[in-house]
Image (cartoon, rainbow, N blue to C red):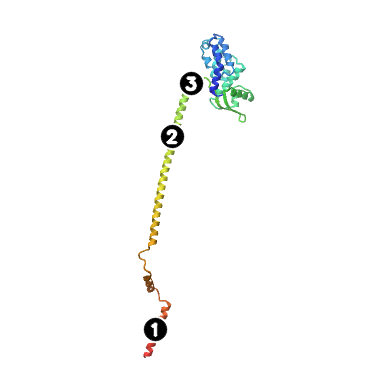
């Protein structure tokens, strides 16, 4: 049962008592209050607390302690009841269970994790079995939702019903909400700044990437142009290269005499010498 359904249910169960409050006068309001606190399914009491006949009778000695008890059920706890027990009417078993369950709701406002040992002491309960039965009934009644962790000996509260506000608690709640709003605004602003920083980094990286790609493209074009020029020079050849005939002549002038040339020279010299002898 969610909070809205619980409020509707408790309002429905409270209606008969609100109708009675319009006709009940004087000291009879004390019984009306006790019957309302005993009623199953009633966990919100502000409408009865503010009803005109109950307010008028609250100053009567016979009604005043009961009206104080009704106020305690609005936003008080079992621990507060114990502190004022001598000034308040005794609780019935049903009222005792209901007040302890409402006390768990109040405790969960400060911490969603409630240790068994803390609850046992706060609610004056002697055994874990009794505490777990109380919590299970509260979950069944829709007063809260949560999980009993027997291994860790704790109650993990998820959601609770909304209790009535103490005098001055509304101003405190407004102040806390304003503080929360300011903190949230600062958090959002910080997140926006981080997002902008990331976007700036992305833009800078994109620019650097574009510049790098451009430099690579220019280098590729330069290398392609140089390779093309080298290939062109190799195909046309250098202008200083000589023709084959001139090259052969040049080579023969520069080369040392071959072996057959040497024998030819020797034969020529031999004939010359023979002519000289015969002439003599």
Q: Secondary structure at mark 2?
A: helix
Mark 1 vs mark 2, CA separation in Å? 111 Å
Q: Nearer the viewer, residue 246 or 278?
A: 246
Q: Residues within 10 Å of mark 2 (few under 14, many from 20)?
A: few
Q: Earlier in the sequence, mark 2 or mark 3?
A: 3
Circle 3 residue: 170
Mark 1 vs mark 3, CA separation in Å? 142 Å
Circle 1 residue: 269
Q: Earlier in the sequence, mark 1 or mark 3?
A: 3
Residue at 45 percent of width and 32 percent of height: 188
Circle 2 residue: 192
Residue 245 against residue 209 in the figure, above or below? below
Q: Nearer the viewer, residue 31 or 17?
A: 17
Image x and y of residue 195, in percent: 44, 36
Image x and y of residue 258, in percent: 42, 76
Which is closer to the viewer, label 2 or label 3? Answer: 2
Q: Nearer the viewer, residue 98 or 123?
A: 98
Is the Cβ of the residue at disc 1 closer than 8 Å to that at disc 3? no
Residue 274 against residue 128 in the figure, above or below? below
Q: Nearer the viewer, residue 14 or 150?
A: 14
Image x and y of residue 223, in percent: 40, 54
Residue at 47 percent of width and 25 percent of height: 177
Which is closer to the viewer, label 1 or label 2? Answer: 1
Q: Secondary structure at mark 3?
A: helix
Report the side of 164 relative to 236 (left or right): right
Q: Residues within 10 Å of mark 1 (few under 14, many from 20)?
A: few
Q: Residue furthest top?
A: 26
């Amino acid at each position: 049962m969610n909070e809205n359904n619980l409020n509707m249910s408790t309002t429905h169960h409270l209606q008969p008592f609100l109708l009675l409050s319009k006709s009940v006068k004087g000291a009879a309001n004390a019984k009306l209050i006790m019957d309302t606190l005993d009623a199953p399914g009633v966990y919100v009491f502000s409408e009865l607390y503010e009803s005109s006949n109950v307010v008028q009778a609250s100053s009567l000695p016979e009604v005043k302690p009961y009206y104080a008890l009704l106020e305690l059920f609005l936003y008080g706890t079992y621990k507060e009841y114990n502190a004022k027990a001598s000034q308040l009417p005794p609780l019935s078993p049903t009222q005792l269970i209901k007040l302890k369950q409402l006390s768990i709701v109040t405790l969960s406002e400060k911490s969603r994790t409630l240790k068994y040992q803390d609850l046992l002491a706060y609610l004056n309960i002697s055994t874990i079995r009794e505490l777990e039965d109380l919590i299970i009934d509260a979950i069944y009644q829709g007063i809260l939702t949560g999980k009993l962790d027997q291994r860790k000996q704790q109650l993990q509260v998820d959601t609770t019903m909304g209790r009535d506000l103490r005098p001055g608690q509304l101003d405190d709640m407004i102040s806390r909400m304003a503080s929360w709003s300011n903190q949230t605004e600062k958090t959002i602003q910080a997140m926006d700044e981080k997002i902008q920083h990331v976007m700036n980094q992305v833009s800078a990286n994109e620019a650097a990437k574009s510049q790098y790609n451009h430099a690579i493209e220019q280098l590729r074009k330069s290398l392609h142009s140089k390779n093309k020029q080298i290939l062109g020079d190799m195909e046309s050849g250098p202008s200083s290269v000589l023709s084959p005939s001139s090259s052969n002549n040049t080579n023969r002038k520069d080369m040392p005499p071959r072996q057959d040339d040497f024998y030819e020279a020797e034969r020529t010299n031999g004939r010359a010498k023979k002519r000289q002898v015969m002439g003599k």
